[in-house]
Amino acid sequence: TEEIIRKSDKLSVVGELAAGVAHEIRNPLTSLKGFLQLLQSKTNDNKIYFDIMLSELDRINFIVNEFLVLAKPQIINFQKKDLLKILQNITILLNTQAIINNVQIHVDFDPSIPLIECEENLIKQLFINILKNAIEAMANGGEIRVQAMKYQNDRILIRCIDQGCGIPEERQIKLFEPFYTTKEKGTGLGLMVCYKIIEAHNGKITIESKINEGTTVNIILPIKHH
Ligand code: ADP
Ligand code: MG
């Protein structure tokens, strides 16, 4: 346990540092954007380049903002949220990494899904962890499908299906243990955090996997929080 405490101490220091850095990035970004807009207003040339630069700055800004929210200590605050919107934003956040890995993310939602009582930042963290794992499992690219449907009247079922390397059966029981990782730069904390988040929402998370075929993460969330 001492080892675990020491590691999580280190982690929160890293989190704070990262949040500080994200903060520092925002100020120069704002000034860059201001000067670009000023230059753009003074010329009719190179419009397309200005547009690209401004939209790329907006993207950095979006990512830095998301990052700041995630790095901050969380006050748990359950509110009715549109899960589809949350997932679409996460897809934007992860798109660069997905493209580099030749991975496409498809979000396929049953339109009748109601708002879900949840803590938005935790739900974001949950899907970021799961989708990152899926991207990292697909060394040769492929597709990730995120499906959501109603389940037993008062719940929804969300499935994240990847076409990655899969997980051998004997390792599947270890997945939610802290510090279990097969990656050189992994923390082994992603799925443990997912488990805690699902627990806080009175939901369920299970993982099915077949070697060389892919992995499916199943999440059940109650529509109303009790
Ligand atoms: P990390 O990603 O830092 O290794 P996680 O807790 O997120 O930690 O995942 C633990 C381990 O579970 C990973 O190292 C990997 O071996 C396995 N894993 C998780 N998700 C997948 C997936 N979608 N496909 C294949 N293996 C996975
Ligand atoms: Mg992970």
Image: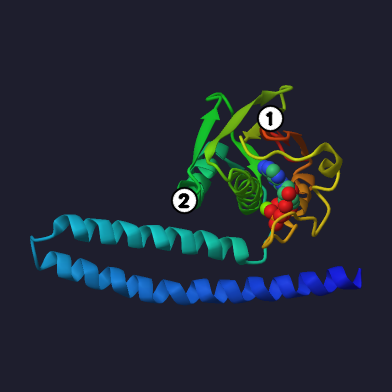
SS under mark 2: helix
Badge 1 density bin: few <14, some 14–19, many ≥20, Cα 10 Å: some
| Residue at the (58%, 72%) spot, across then down | 18
Q: Quadrant of residue 116?
A: top right
For disc 2, does the CB lie below 8 Å from ligand 2?
Answer: no
220 is higher (above) or lower (below) than 90: above
- Please, which colouring scheme is shown? rainbow
Residue matched to label 2: 100
Point out the image quarter for the N terminus: bottom right
User: Does residue 50 appear left or right of residue 29 in this picture?
Assistant: left
Look at the image and tell me whether residue 160 can be seen.
yes
Q: Position of residue 29 (x, y in %)?
A: 36, 71
Front residue of this view, candidates 158 and 95: 95
Residue matched to label 1: 157
Residue furthest to the left:
44
Frontmost of labels 2 and 1 is 2
Front residue of this view, candidates 76 and 85: 85
21 is higher (above) or lower (below) than 82: below
SS under mark 1: strand
| Dot 2 or dot 1, earlier in sequence | 2
Q: Position of residue 105 (x, y in %)?
A: 51, 38
| Residue at the (47%, 77%) spot, across then down | 24
Look at the image and tell me whether residue 217 can be seen.
no
| Residue at the (66%, 31%) spot, across then down | 213
